Amino acid sequence: MEKILRIFGKESISINQAALFLGFFTLISQILALFRDRSLAHFVGPGQQLDAYYAAFRVPDLIFICVASLAGATVLIPFLAAKMPARQLSGGDGDKTDEAKKYLSDIFTVFFIVMISVSILAFLLMPYLVSFIAPGFTPVFQAKLVALSRIMLFSPILMGLSNLFGTVTQFFHKFFIYALSPIFYNIGIIVGVVFLYPIFDIYGLAIGVVFGAFMHFVIQVFASSSCGFTPKFSLFPFAVNFKDIKKVAVTSLPRTLGLAFNNIALIFIISFASFLKVGSISVFNFSFNLQSVPLNIIGISYAVAAFPTLAKVVSLGKMDEFKNHLKSAARAIVFWSMPVIFLFIVVRAQIVRVILGSGNFSWDNTRLVAACLAVFSVSILAQGMITLLSRAYYANGDTKTPLIVNFSCSILIIILSYVLIYSFENVLVFRYFIESMLKVSDIAGTEVLMLPLAYSTGTILNSILHWFFVRRDFMKGESFITKTFFQSLGASFFLGLVAYIGLNIFSPIFGTTTLLGVFLQGFISGMLGIGAAILVLYLLKNEELKYIIQTLKTKFWQADIIAPAQEEL
């Protein structure tokens, strides 16, 4: 077992290597997440029950972001490293080790008390908060939402503690174990859908979420115990060093606020959706989760892989290297994201039908989720660039710029959600244009399309502002993605064209009434489109394609696993 696990301790040679490995590991977790969503679509289906379930995440998610991210691994590990010798597992300087243990125990104690206190307060206020989360729900389903949210309040406590213990596993390079936690979390939710939902109705889903969070927590407890570094309770408040606690809170506060603003925007979106056709919240969340798959695999993988390198070269004052690494990661995100956007737009119905289309998930549900997915897909590149460019500022110690941009665009998303829904319902020309373009004019509930449209518009503006400020502050006006953008755009156009022609050719051959037929139709068309895009990029002598081919020829699977922080339940 030690020999097997040694491969996960190798240092990465390049950002591409680390990103490819992280992307592969993220893919495994995302596949399980898709099985989770398929189970929800099959056994429950879009409706008031599932709307209440998804809405119930909003307050626990906000608590998790606002409290747990204050003590995230990306913040704690540098402080922890300063408290003890690097890579020291045991022995050696006993005083330094004891100091580090005491530091982590203080964080654990304060974090636990704050998390429990906030969760209890949310438990008591939930009947009042429900009027803001889902004002359009009937009193019966508002009561269900209160009960579901109260059950789920155990999740941020368990997940927050798990992430705190996960700091130890990451510090001691137990990356493989750390990366297993999200898998078990999704398994817990699937257990809730398949086994608990038939017994406890909708409340079984919430119990499944808590069970998944518990498994997430247990794995990290055992992993940290094996390192001999398990946090313990300090005598509160007398034995706690509040100066250290303050440093951690001040350091992580701007990033926490940025994440919180995005979550608050989602709360408003869910609030607006509660007034729309029953099932709108479910449709929004299904499409949001699907578009998050390429975002997690591409954008977040490159951003997380690039951050340690960016921070290191900044600390050494090597700004030319900083710019080169940032350019490389940004171009890679553009290179991968543009084809995904066109592919998702063209084969959206096949993607949704294969992944979600069974049981209680109807063909109308498929078309509506597919339309939302197409609108979300437009912003996949923007979302990926935000994750990278904001980290460029964090690496330079500037948390103010991304905070202001994120806040402004979150406000814009909220305003646009209201304005677009109003326009869609009252301006018939606008409604007809959107429904005709997405081919959903003959089904009900199309108002929900305005929510992903508002989210994508605000996100694209957010990305443009980040790009503008990065060019101004770090690149001295130099363009760093233009060539790659237009090369990838051209290749993606041919990808979409070939895939679209393929769908029309294979539709009568394979049919559209069976799962296998829909899968083969979409898969073969998509692969032909990808082949056409690769050929175009090769003819254009695209540099990113060359880098990817070179990286694939190396043993990139020996790169160090970098586990991204959990940013929502």
Image (cartoon, helix red, strand yellow):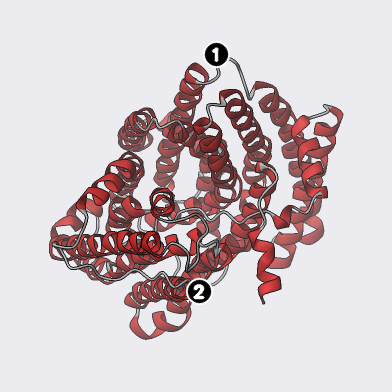
Considering every residue shown, the one lying at the far bottom of the view is 199
Q: Is residue 153 left or right of residue 448?
A: left
Front residue of 12 and 355:
12
The disc, 2 or 1, on the residue closer to the chain's N-terminal end is: 2
The percent coordinates of residue 492 (x first, y second) are 71, 35
Q: Quadrant of residue 426?
A: top left
Q: What residue lies at 41% left-to-right and 69% top-to-bottom? A: 229
For badge 2, the amino acid type reads Ile
Quarter placement of the N terminus: bottom right
Q: Is residue 420 left or right of residue 506?
A: left
Calculate the distance from the C-alpha at mark 2 to the C-alpha at mark 1.
Answer: 48 Å
The percent coordinates of residue 475 (x first, y second) are 55, 19
- The residue under label 1 is 477
For badge 1, the amino acid type reads Gly
Q: What residue lies at 25% left-to-right and 55% top-to-bottom? A: 134
Q: Is residue 360 among the parts visible in the rendering?
A: no
Q: What residue lies at 57% left-to-right and 43% top-to-bottom? A: 299
Front residue of 384 and 36:
384
Q: Quadrant of residue 94?
A: bottom left
Q: What residue lies at 71% left-to-right and 72% top-to-bottom? A: 3
Q: Crowdedness of circle 1 by 10 Å Cα count: few (<14), some, many (20+)?
A: few
Q: Is residue 348 above or below residue 418?
A: below
Q: Is residue 460 among the parts visible in the rendering?
A: yes
- The residue under label 2 is 187
Q: Is residue 12 left or right of residue 261?
A: right
Quarter placement of the C terminus: bottom left
Front residue of 220 and 567:
220
Q: Quadrant of residue 551?
A: top right
